[in-house]
Image (cartoon, rainbow, N blue to C red):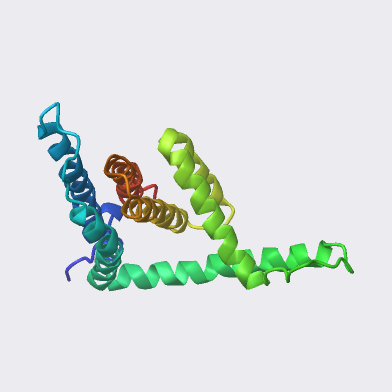
Amino acid sequence: MTAIPARLDLPARRRRHARLIAALTTAVCACASAAQALYQPVADAPPGQEAVVVDPLPLVYLSGTAGPLLEAAQVEDEARWPAAVEREREQARRTSAARVALARAQEIVEEPGVAWPVPLPTAEQAAVIDLAGVGDEVAELWRGDPARAAALVRELASCGEYTADEVLDAALGAAIGAGLLALAEASGTSDPSMMAEQCLQATPYLVLAVALASADLG
């Protein structure tokens, strides 16, 4: 009888997110190319030339296609690792239930009769918000101190309300969102130099996303 590897359905994160990592790398390269299309004509122009024609189309195209490119890569990764995806979903159901239970417990101890101008989130909504919040926190901390960020992920996972991969995925989503937002802002800028500069500002977030997609703390 042939032994089945215990982690056959549990690839490392860099394998689990391989298509996404490749797509993020493509987007980073595209950012450089789009900025180059804006900077190079100015660099090549004679010193006395005031009006310089640049090409903003690569940036506009990138801004419109980067999001769908990354989403498609994530779908492809899920299709490649169905067993791992199912395990992630099962873990997410357990951790979400733990966060919902905590939110409901907090509702019980809150002072009754307080009037709020807008309805408070339900326990289920609060569980989703909490995960997004820790993802934002980890993504921001990872930019400056990956070791501290990794320690925070392990600490969060130890409480049973999150898994390490769940927190890393939330941080990954936050980094991608920030990168796409930077591209959208760049494409809406009229000044070519500012357009190129803001385009390049998207790359640290995309590189951060690669690091978060590759990080394996298990």
Residue 145 appears in the rendering: no
Camera-side residue: 122 or 12? 122
Camera-side residue: 23 or 10? 23
Residue 150 position within the rendered picture, expressed as x and y whole percent measured from the top left: 45, 41
- Left or right of 155 on screen, residue 12: left
Residue 177 appears in the rendering: yes
- The answer to whether residue 10 is above or below residue 135 is below
Give the quarter of the image for residue 101. Answer: bottom right
Camera-side residue: 155 or 110? 110
Residue 61 position within the rendered picture, expressed as x and y whole percent measured from the top left: 22, 60
- The answer to whether residue 181 is above or below residue 128 is above
Residue drawn at (17%, 71%) of the image: 1
- The answer to whether residue 36 is above or below residue 26 is above
Residue 71 position within the rendered picture, expressed as x and y whole percent measured from the top left: 30, 66
- Left or right of 184 on screen, residue 51: left
Residue drawn at (18%, 47%) of the image: 29
- Left or right of 213 on screen, residue 42: left
Residue 38 position within the rendered picture, expressed as x and y whole percent measured from the top left: 20, 43
- Left or right of 186 on screen, residue 151: right
Marks counted in the figure total 0
Residue drawn at (31%, 72%) of the image: 83
Residue drawn at (56%, 54%) of the image: 133
